Amino acid sequence: MLLAGFFAELVLQRKGMNHLIKDRAKRILLPFLIGIFIFIPIVMFVSNQTWAGGFTNAFEEVSTIERAKSYLFWSALTDIKAFNEYWLAHFWFIYFLLYFYLFHWLFNLLGKRDFVFRENMALNKTICFTLNHKLGFIVLSALAFPIHYSLQSPMFWPSHFNFQVNELIYYFGFYVFGAYLYKNVSLLKVLAKHCWFYLLISLPFVFILNEPTTRHDLMRNVIVDITSWKIANIQVWEEGILANGWFKVTIVFLRCAVSWTLCLGFIGLAHRYLNNPNRSVRYLADSAYWVFWIHVIFTCFFSRYAQQLSFENAMFKTVAIFYLILFCMYFLYNNFIRYTFLGDYFMGKRKDPADPNENEFSTLNITKKSVPVCLATLVISLAWGYLYNKTVENEKRDSLFASFIARDEGYLDKYKSLAGVEDRYGRNPLHLATINPESVRIYNPIPILLEKNVNINERDIAGRTPLFYAVRNGNLKDTILLIDKGADMTMADDYGHTPAHVAAIKTGAYDPKISDHYLEILKSLKEKGADLDARDYRGRTVLDCLKHFGNRELN
């Protein structure tokens, strides 16, 4: 987003707003429309994806034609729903850009009254100060922190048509920053000077923050499920935002800092080392938009079928698929994009195949240069994957994934017992088996897992049992099955929420059908003997939660 703002301001200053809008309509709007109406259905079709994942019962005994129809126009032509919302995949990024170009144009219409892009002195001084001082990123992080903290999760997940308002505002801040960076283009020299500092302090945190972020998300109050900033259904509960105290504050601030330092570091690095003309760098830059646009179809397709291979070295498969995807993308780029009319859309202007310098970038020459590196990394990944498999082969961790995707009914039979198997967050196979919607599973792994001695009342790091998960995910049949098999309905999580509390809270869902479904689950829990007088961490009974969050009563 930062670079989008930078180059938008560059075009605006050099060629005017009309040229900027026409260029972005050609290179952003048109590819976006083609992407969501043609590309996404193709991606979903070839990878057999649905809103619930790639391994579901949605297309059992369904013809290829009916399956194809379910992907067109977001399932509008059939009763078989491949989507549960208007899904944008990676085109969410372009979707947001369209809004930002619109905002840029609207502010430009204000003329001297434009208080955002037209030489806002406060913004200009802030940006100059933060970039002229090596530790200025702390100020930028502090400014971004309130918006980032208001999100339900420290992690940014892909947005769709019904986007989160605060997320749009957050990214717009980067866009505006990029525009002002162009206004102060001399500051690129300062970024080049500090680039290694920014990268060295941020890159370790890219990996370090992943685990605590996942841990935070698992530990969040269940009220986060009915908290939404989405433009069509804004519904904000403070308990869904102000969760986990200083743990969330720390993670969010560090993520803000990493976002800024990575952006500033890579921009500075590029200005420092790539500022001089370089044909290889230019080739990669020209192909970047195409790679962004097309990569998902190959990633989804090859990943889906690689999962089904009996060869269990995941590390080797990952690296092999990565190179296969690269080859496919650049083969298409060289043969159908770089020298054709499509290059005018993806590169701004197609290249001349008669140019003698272009021979350097033929698919054959690039492949020859890449082979040694590819072979070396494949050998390393094969050895690494083998050692990893040897390390964990007795831990039965694959049963966790098998329980989650519920793809192969016979897979779990190879184990006599799965007692004690859990992930780093304390979740056993039963926890994971109850996550996916029961209505779309190929089979139900829960009966098999119970036969394998999986603890039905195991608690995860937040004190949540498989029954808690089943209720939270709206799986009524799983809920009844677990209770009948001995699941304890009185066990509460760290917030004092029992499964009955969860059902009551989730009647506060914005969608009336979802609300009704959770009320039905609550009624079933009551019939099974759930304690409706149990109190949570704020002293609320189940019926109190039902009234407070769902504005409903239990008859």
Image: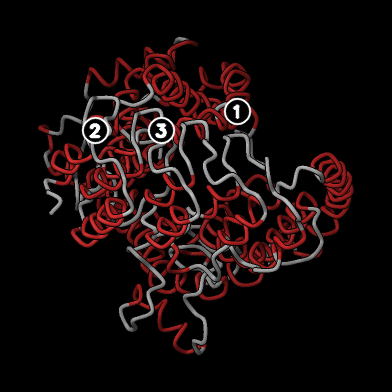
Measure the alpha-carbon separation of dots 3 and 2: 48 Å
Which of discs 3 and 1 lies nearer the camera? The answer is: 3
Task: Assess disc 2: are there few (<14), some (14-19) or many (≥20) residues with their C-alpha within 10 Å of its C-alpha.
Answer: some
| Residue 382 x, y percent position in the rendering | 86, 49
What's under tag 1, amino acid-wise?
A: Leu
Measure the alpha-carbon separation of dots 2 and 1: 26 Å
| Residue 33 x, y percent position in the rendering | 36, 67
Task: Assess disc 1: are there few (<14), some (14-19) or many (≥20) residues with their C-alpha within 10 Å of its C-alpha.
Answer: many
Secondary structure at numbered mark 3: loop
Q: Is residue 80 above or below residue 220?
A: below
The answer to which of marks 2 and 1 sits earlier in the sequence is 2
Which of discs 3 and 2 lies nearer the camera? The answer is: 3
- In the picture, which quadrant includes the C terminus? bottom left
Pick whichever, 31 or 277, lies toward us: 31
The quarter holding residue 146 reads top left
What's under tag 3, amino acid-wise?
A: Asp
Secondary structure at numbered mark 1: helix
| Residue 323 x, y percent position in the rendering | 74, 57
Display coloring: secondary structure
- Circle 3 sits on which residue? 493
| Residue 415 x, y percent position in the rendering | 76, 56
What's under tag 2, amino acid-wise?
A: Phe
Pick whichever, 236 or 442, lies toward us: 442
- Residue 66 makes an appearance in the image: yes
Task: Name the residue rendered at 51%, 67% in the picture.
Answer: 441
The answer to which of marks 3 and 2 sits earlier in the sequence is 2
- Circle 2 sits on which residue? 117
Secondary structure at numbered mark 2: loop
Task: Assess disc 3: are there few (<14), some (14-19) or many (≥20) residues with their C-alpha within 10 Å of its C-alpha.
Answer: many
Task: Name the residue rendered at 35%, 29% in the picture.
Answer: 495
Q: For residue 269, which numbered disc appears in the image?
A: 1
Q: Is residue 322 left or right of residue 61?
A: right
